[in-house]
């Protein structure tokens, strides 16, 4: 006799692999962006707001270097990785005028310091505060957050390696002449990694 077929419907079972954890996907890192080189207007506006006086900022024809005389005050700015990402340097005359104007010191002592080629402790401390606030120029949206690390005065000792190599670089930099109304001016350089 012929085999009998079941009238029950057949069900198919799919071969399902055992449940596995999804593959590990590392978290998405934010895109790497670069620190912006500030515009002359941004520098002028920042310093005018800080010292409460008019400022002018124009491109300089000469580069500020570690060899600039009578000296250079250089500030290093670091990222969260403690890596130097930017250097801002001023010559002694601009350092004297910025330090005096923010500290409400009369123009006479600033002009004397500029002529003598050295900053007093008070002028250097005041200038350091200006250079600290200067970090705001770098902290644009989506750019690494930079903060002031150290300030070096070449009239008090040789500049260390990072400021020297940045100031000798011809890469991403802005060289300017800054003038503070009622005080005087000098050279400023911003160099980025």
Image: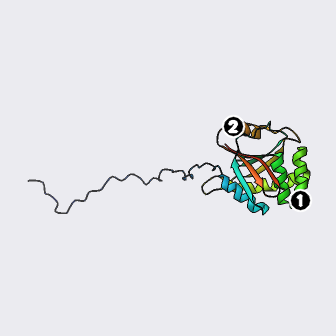
Give the residue drawn at x 69%, y 49%: 58
Nearest the eye: 19 or 126: 126
Badge 2 marks a residue whose secondary structure is loop
Count the numbered circles shown. Answer: 2
54 left or right of 122 in image: left
Above or below, 154 against 26 in this view is above
Residue 186: x percent and y percent?
Answer: 78, 48
Label 1, label 2: how many angstroms apart (C-alpha)?
36 Å
Q: Nearer the viewer, mark 1 or mark 2?
A: 1
Pointer 1 residue: 106
Disc on the earlier residue, 1 or 2 = 1
Residue 63: x percent and y percent?
Answer: 72, 39
Give the residue drawn at x 79%, y 50%: 185
Pointer 2 residue: 169
152 left or right of 165 in image: right
Nearest the eye: 162 or 121: 121
- Marks 1 & 2, CB-CB < 8 Å contact: no
Badge 1 marks a residue whose secondary structure is loop
Nearest the eye: 85 or 172: 172
Residue 141: x percent and y percent?
Answer: 61, 57
User: Dot 2: few (<14), some (14–19), or many (≥20) neighbours within 10 Å?
Assistant: some
Q: How is the image coloured?
A: rainbow
45 left or right of 22 in image: right
Give the residue drawn at x 22%, y 59%: 10
């Amino acid at each position: 006799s012929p085999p009998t077929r079941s009238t029950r419907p057949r069900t198919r079972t799919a071969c399902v692999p055992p449940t596995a954890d999804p593959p590990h996907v590392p978290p998405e890192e934010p895109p790497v962006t670069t620190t912006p080189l500030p515009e002359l207007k941004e520098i002028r506006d920042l310093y005018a707001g800080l010292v409460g006086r008019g400022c002018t900022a124009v491109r300089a024809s000469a580069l500020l270097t570690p060899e600039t005389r009578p000296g250079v005050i250089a500030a290093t700015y670091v990222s969260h990785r403690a890596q130097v990402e930017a250097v801002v340097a001023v010559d002694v005359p601009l350092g004297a005028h910025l330090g005096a104007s923010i500290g409400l010191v009369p123009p006479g002592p600033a002009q004397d310091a500029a002529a003598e080629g050295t900053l007093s402790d008070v002028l250097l401390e005041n200038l350091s505060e200006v250079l600290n606030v200067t970090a705001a120029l770098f902290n644009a949206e989506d750019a690494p957050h930079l903060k002031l690390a150290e300030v070096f005065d070449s009239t008090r000792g040789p500049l260390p390696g990072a400021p020297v190599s940045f100031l000798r670089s011809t890469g991403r930099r802005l060289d300017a002449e800054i003038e503070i109304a009622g005080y005087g001016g000098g050279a400023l350089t911003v160099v980025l990694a």
